[in-house]
Image (cartoon, rainbow, N blue to C red):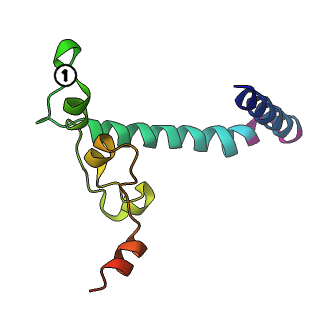
Amino acid sequence: MLTSTALLVVMLGFLGGLTYVFGWLFLVKYYVGPYVVFVIWLDLVTFLHHTEADIPWYRGEDWYFLKGALSTIDRDYGFINAIHHDIGTHVAHHIFSICRTTISRRQQRRSNPS
């Protein structure tokens, strides 16, 4: 708790210093704008992994961990898979949250040369 609070204060001081030196427009252009784009992108990907017309939503007594974990979907993002660390194994990520479920393309090629 102390470390995160200290680092938050350092970051706010850094952003405040940037704003003081370069102005608000600089902060919005180089920090706020990219941050908002990142958050929207992350929310969209999370929404897509957890929403599909054929997959039901469970609430209350009808929901338990495994049922919720199996109610996600693996999606192929095509040419932007690398941006998402090839997370085509999203369902496995929910079931085995401790295990690393994504393997880089380079590692796949090394282990399976064809």
In front: 85, or 26?
85
Residue 45 visible in rendering: yes
Mark 1 lies on residue: 58
Residue 97 position by quadrant: top left
| Image: magenta residue range | 21-26
In front: 65, or 19?
65
Residue found farthest to the right: 21
If the image is split into quadrants, where does the N terminus sit?
A: top right
**Residue at the image point whose x is 40% and y is 45% from the top:** 98
Residue 113 place in picture, x, y as percent: 31, 85
Residue 50 place in picture, x, y as percent: 27, 36
Residue 80 visible in rendering: no
**Residue at the image point whose x is 82% and y is 36% from the top:** 19
In front: 69, or 40?
69
- What amino acid type is highlighted by mark number 1? Tyr
Left or right position of 33 against 51: right
10 Å neighbourhood of mark 1: few (<14), some, or many (≥20)? Answer: few
Q: Is residue 100 magenta?
A: no
Q: Is residue 90 above or below residue 32?
A: below
Q: Is residue 68 above or below residue 29?
A: above
For mark 1, give the secondary structure.
loop
If the image is split into quadrants, where does the C terminus sit?
A: bottom left
Residue 34 place in picture, x, y as percent: 59, 44
Residue 92 place in picture, x, y as percent: 28, 48
**Residue at the image point whose x is 35% and y is 65% from the top:** 79
Q: Is residue 86 above or below residue 90?
A: below
Left or right position of 57 against 77: left
Q: Which is the main secondary structure of the residues drawn in magenta?
A: helix
Q: Is residue 24 magenta?
A: yes
Left or right position of 109 against 29: left
